[in-house]
Amino acid sequence: MSAGATRAAVEAVWRIESARLVAGLARLVRDVGVAEDLAQDALVIALEKWPESGVPDNPGAWLMATAKRRGIDLLRRDVMLDRKHAQMAHALEQQQEPSPDENVDGVQDDLLRLVFTACHPVLSTEAQVALTLRLLGGLTTAEIARAFLAPEPTVGQRISRAKRTLTQANVPFEVPSGAELAPRLGAVLDVIYLIFNEGYSATAGEDWVRPGLCEDALRLGRVLAQLMPREPEVHGLVALMELSASRLRARLGPEGQPVLLADQDRSRWDRVLVRRGLAALELAERLGGARGPYALQAGIAACHARARTAQETDWERIVACYDALAQLTSSPVVELNRAVAVGMAYGPAEGLALADQLLDAPALRSYHLLPAVRADLLARLGRVDEAQEELARAASLTRNTRERELLLDRARRLRPGG
């Protein structure tokens, strides 16, 4: 195998094994930062050795054994060995070498602990996202920085601070139980969906969608669903992401320009993802989670997925889902989406009346989709001049280049002869 092919194989193995590796090490040393350093050291050694020796039959077990040996060596060489380091070294020495038929349940438990640790409330949302992508997604600092259009040093510092914060706060490497589980699980789901949403509709930059981020979030969601098969909201989130991701190819035109839902070629929707999404939604409902916030949003996405054409969309059912969602969340963004659905189901005047009630909402003051939605409704009512002004205002508020071009183009088309 050539050096290039070996490097590609190492990188592929890393994307698959890194989360389980870090999770297993974190369980032993009880420090996510130390665990990740040991895992990274093992990766470097693999990059040195595998071009000559070839990729081992069980690369995950090889990396784990190498990381542990590396950890023991480093800890023993530390002349300032303190009690914590002694405990880490002892834990690494006592752990038996992993075998190809390693206990699957144990690995899953470790992964679950890692998910909840990376999304611990002691960290900011930005830190939770960066750490989750790093530890569970296997992304490098550069990849995370590119995904969120942030300087690489900033992301690197954010990850370092997050690991340091977890250590200083003595955050236990465990899954919360009892009354603590629901809010902590909610935060985990929010982080995964935030990653997906940034890929589905980028807030800034030159690209309207970033499919790689959607794939990372979807993979994390599927892993979480395997780890927590009895949690309906986990399946609700997976359903929402599967159904939304099914439309990704159709969301872009040949030049990379945005294509809105009503204008999409539905033959380009990924039917495999649609089937997976509908199955996940059915499972969430069977588990009693039909009224959860993510299951309700998945229900809305399912209405779109089941409609053969935009005209066949069951907008009344979508309005009912938004009614339930609004009662759960009290979110002005949900209310804005509800105004869109009402406008489609019962006419633009009714939708505009609801949208106008949000004009003074502080959270939407700089939100470009409020004037964009009002523009749609005003145009359908024949109030073209007002619609143009709203589209121009929406274009001035968005930080995404493609979306700005779309909004200005729509304003231009409203002009006579446009």
Image: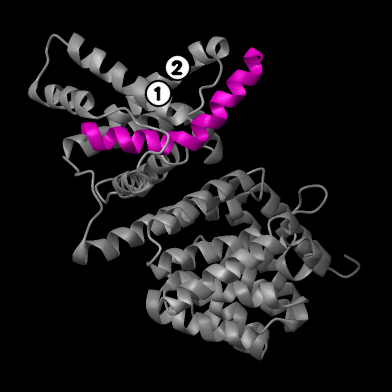
Compared across the picture, whether 36 is left or right of 382 comes to left
Q: Is residue 99 magenta?
A: no
Q: Which secondary structure dominates the residues rendered in magenta?
A: helix
Q: Which span is picked out in magenta? A: 1-29
- Classify 25 as above or below 312: above
- Classify 46 as above or below 125: above
Along the viewing direction, whichever of 400 and 226 lies nearer the viewer: 226
Residue shown at 51% from the left, 35% from the top: 15
Residue 383 in sight from this viewpoint: no
- Give the residue pinned by disc 1: 40
Q: Amino acid at mark 1?
A: Gln
Q: Amino acid at mark 2?
A: Val
Are circles 2 and 1 on residues that touch, CB within 8 Å?
yes
Quadrant in the rendering for residue 406:
bottom right
Farthest-out residue, left: 83
Q: Pinpoint residue 20: horizontal percent, then vertical percent.
A: 39, 38
Along the viewing direction, whichever of 194 and 34 lies nearer the viewer: 34
Residue shown at 46% from the left, 69% from the top: 294
- The label on residue 86 is none
- Give the residue pinned by disc 2: 44
